[in-house]
Structure formats: structure tokens, C-alpha cells
């Protein structure tokens, strides 16, 4: 994926119709980060969560030593829980596949997204996903898919 | 916009850190880079992210800034054509320390980390250029810390105006060739916008500068240098 079709990609992954203006704003305020190889680091344990990654395509993986990993596919948000908490990342987050495309969302962009009802609801569901994924760690299964 | 297909023929090549890179190195970068355009106000990189590559600016102007605890912006420096963004983060394997935002429509080339490291390993001259660049930026950061700690607001403003003049040059009417809001100047000086507005007015009345809207021209550079204790 190039750098130019980010608005289209956002529209593809959100489960609702968003106005062109809002999508354009998100594109301007976020930064696009492509990852090219498996194992490339999105966050290292201990990194300050000044923002979070929104996966546009590909898969990221939260590595939890001695536990199952959590897979983040298109639409999922990596580091959202730590960002909301205002803390540091408790685990490493890495690129799982060959090509991963993400948007990095900082505080300003996040606040802007929160101002739009549909995005606000979407973000709430992402927070619930985070909770679900950690809760699922208690269940013995090889992986959790979000 | 003239998009360079090959780094060897890029107009910014002589002024960039890639100057002196051998043909194979330039070939490697040319094949793997992605040319990207950014609109005014668009963010290239965010503080706290771990980008897996660097941007080499081809055209446009970019500000590097950090956000304080209350969300106040502190502009660290500006990036112009031929400059690299994000290289210190990937060299040190740390999250990026400042956000980069386009001040005008900007065009940059994104070079993946793997190619960047390969040319570092293969080209001692390029490695030395990067080392020089890092040392220069370290020196500039040291000067900025001293300036913020020891100079008063008017002296710092004079210094910033001199830096802007040197970095961006002047247009045909003699104004500094960058459109910054008073708030952005205040964020560079490290003070309130109201203070900057008052001090710019003072400097204008005293004949050091002239201004027209957002634009500022330096009228008496040597007096400003003296005020800012900046000596060439």
C-alpha cells in the first residue's frame, strides 16, 4: 500500500459511514507508519504511550512472555489501553507479518476523533476489545484474534 | 512537482547527508524509497512512535516540536530541503523524540530502515556525515538549553529571528521566507503569544525589524546579534 490511499483505507476498516471531512482530518493529524518485516517493533516494553497505532492492514502482535500472544489485525488499536492510562507499555508489540501499515494517533488526533459520535463509539468498542483480549488470556487457547 | 526518480539526480542531493554516498548506495536507496507528499499541517511523524524509516525532505518546510504536559507546543527546530527526519530514533532504537509537521505543502522521500542501515554499513563517508549531523544537532540543542536558561525573552526572540533568517533566507521583499504565526514564534522562544506580539512591536518601533502581517524582515542584523549575544 502506498502513502496516498489512507482515507480509503480508513473507510474500509470502519464499520460506519464517515464524512470525508473527518477522515481527511484524521489523515492530516495522524502519521502513517509502514512496517516491512516481521519482528519490527511498534512499541517496546517500557515505552511511554504518547499515542497508539491503528492497524490499517497486516497484523501486529502483542508479545506476552510465558502467555499467549494477542494478534491485532486491520481496525485494531495497539497501545490504546496504555495511552488511555497515561502510562508505559507493559509488553512488546511487533509486526507479525511481512507488511503492516499503521496510523500513529496522538492525543490531538484522538481528542478530535472522540468529538465525532461514530468514531467515539468505535473507540469505545476498541477499549472493550482491549479488556476482552486481556480477559481471554485466562482462557487456554493459542491466540486471541481481535 | 518535480519528483526525483533517482537520488543521484535529486536537486537536494548535494546538500543532504547522502552527499558523498557511492553509486551503489544511491541505487539501493532509490529503488526502495517511497516519495510522499504532505499537505500543510499534515504530520509526518509523531513523538513516541517508532518509525521504521527516515524521511529525506525534498521540498517544503517542517517544524519539529514536542508537547508539554499541558499540551503546549515547544518548537525545537525547523527542517528544510535535504534534511533527514527520524534518523536519530532508528539509530538509537528509541521512540522518536519530537513530532514533525509540514508548515507548507511538502514533498519527502521515505527510506526504509533496512536500506538506511545497509548504506551506513557499506559507506563510511555516509556514516561520518551522519555522525557530523548528530554532533551538530547536539551542539545546537546545547545552545538552545543555554539560551532558554540564561537569556531573557527579548534576547531569545532576537536570536530566534536571526536563526529563522539564516535557515530560510529572505524573499524578494526582504522578509524571512517562512510564514509563522505569532503563536509558533512564541512556541519557539518558549513564552506566551502575548509577550511575543508585544516584543515584536517593540523591536519594530526601535527599528530592529519591520513587519507586514505575519511576515518579518530584519532591518538591523548586527544590533539584533548584539542583543542576542550571537557572534558569527
Image (tube, coloured by chain):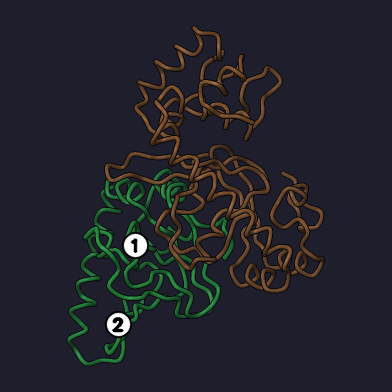
Judging from the image, what secondary structure is the residue with disc 1 in?
Answer: loop
A74 shown above or below B209: below
Chain identifier, green in the render: A
Question: Which residue is disc 2 drawn over?
Answer: A64
Image quadrant in which you'd find residue A88: bottom left
Drawn side of residue B203 relative to residue A105, left or right: right
User: In the image, is residue B83 above or below residue B49?
Assistant: above
Q: Using the image as rendered, state which of residue B99 and residue B210 is in the foreground.
A: B210
Residue at 58% over, 44% down? B79
Q: What is the crowding at mark 2: few (fewer than 14 residues within 10 Å), some, or many (at least 20)?
A: some
Quadrant into which the N terminus of chain B falls: top right
Query: Which chain is disc 2 placed on?
Result: A
List x then y, in percent, for residue B184.
Answer: 44, 32
**Residue at coordinates 31% horizontally, 75% vertically from top-left?**
A91
Up the image or down, A118 lies above or below A138; here it is above
Q: Reading the chain from its start, which is encountered first: label 2 or label 1? A: 1
Residue nearest the observer in this picture, B207 or B10: B207
Question: Dividing the picture into quarters, in which one does residue B231 lie?
Answer: top right
Q: Position of residue B142 (x, y in %)?
A: 48, 45
Q: Position of residue A136 (x, y in %)?
A: 20, 82
Q: CA distance from mark 2 to mark 1?
A: 29 Å
- The chain containing the residue under callout 1 comes to A
Secondary element at tag 2: loop
Foreground residue, B30 or A6?
B30
Indicate left or right for B151 with B178 as reference: left
Q: Which residue is mark 1?
A: A15
| Chain painted brown | B
Q: Compared with residue A40, is residue B112 higher up or lower down, i.e. above or below?
A: above
Residue A25: give x, y in percent of width and height: 42, 45
Amino acid at each position: 500500500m502506498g502513502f496516498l490511499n489512507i482515507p480509503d483505507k480508513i473507510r474500509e476498516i470502519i464499520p460506519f459511514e464517515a464524512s470525508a471531512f473527518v477522515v481527511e482530518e484524521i489523515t492530516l493529524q495522524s502519521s502513517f507508519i509502514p512496517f516491512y518485516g516481521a519482528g519490527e517493533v511498534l512499541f517496546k516494553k517500557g515505552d511511554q504511550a504518547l499515542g497508539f497505532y491503528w492497524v490499517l492492514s497486516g497484523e501486529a502482535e502483542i508479545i506476552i512472555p510465558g502467555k499467549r500472544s494477542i494478534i491485532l489485525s486491520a481496525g485494531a488499536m495497539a497501545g490504546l489501553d496504555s495511552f488511555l492510562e497515561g502510562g508505559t507499555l507493559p509488553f512488546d508489540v511487533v509486526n507479525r507479518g511481512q507488511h503492516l501499515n499503521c496510523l500513529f494517533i496522538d492525543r490531538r488526533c484522538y481528542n478530535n476523533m472522540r468529538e465525532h459520535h461514530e468514531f467515539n463509539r468505535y473507540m469505545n468498542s476498541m477499549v472493550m476489545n482491549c479488556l476482552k483480549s486481556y480477559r481471554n488470556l485466562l482462557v487456554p487457547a493459542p491466540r486471541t484474534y481481535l | 512537482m518535480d519528483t526525483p526518480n533517482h537520488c543521484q539526480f535529486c536537486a537536494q542531493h548535494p546538500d543532504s547527508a547522502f552527499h558523498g554516498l557511492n553509486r551503489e548506495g544511491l541505487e539501493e536507496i532509490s529503488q526502495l524509497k517511497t516519495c510522499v507528499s504532505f499537505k500543510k499541517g499534515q504530520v509526518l511523524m509523531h513523538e513516541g512512535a517508532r518509525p521504521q524509516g527516515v524521511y529525506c525532505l525534498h521540498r517544503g518546510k517542517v517544524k519539529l516540536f514536542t508537547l508539554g504536559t499541558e499540551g503546549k507546543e515547544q518548537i525545537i527546530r525547523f527542517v528544510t530541503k535535504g534534511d533527514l527526519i527520524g534518523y536519530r530514533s532508528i539509530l538509537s532504537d528509541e521512540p522518536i523524540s519530537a513530532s514533525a509537521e509540514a508548515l507548507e505543502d511538502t514533498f519527502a522521500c521515505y527510506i526504509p530502515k533496512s536500506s538506511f542501515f545497509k548504506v551506513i554499513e557499506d559507506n563510511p563517508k555516509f556514516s561520518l556525515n551522519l555522525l557530523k549531523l548528530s554532533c551538530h544537532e547536539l551542539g545546537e540543542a546545547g545552545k538552545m538549553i543555554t539560551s532558554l536558561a540564561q537569556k531573557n525573552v527579548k534576547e531569545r526572540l532576537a536570536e530566534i529571528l536571526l536563526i529563522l533568517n539564516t535557515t530560510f533566507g529572505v524573499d524578494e521583499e526582504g522578509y524571512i521566507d517562512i510564514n509563522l504565526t505569532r503563536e509558533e514564534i512564541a512556541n519557539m522562544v518558549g513564552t506566551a503569544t502575548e509577550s511575543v506580539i508585544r516584543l515584536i512591536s517593540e523591536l519594530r518601533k526601535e527599528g530592529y525589524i519591520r513587519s507586514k502581517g505575519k511576515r518579518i524582515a530584519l532591518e538591523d542584523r548586527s544590533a539584533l546579534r548584539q542583543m542576542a549575544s550571537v557572534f558569527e
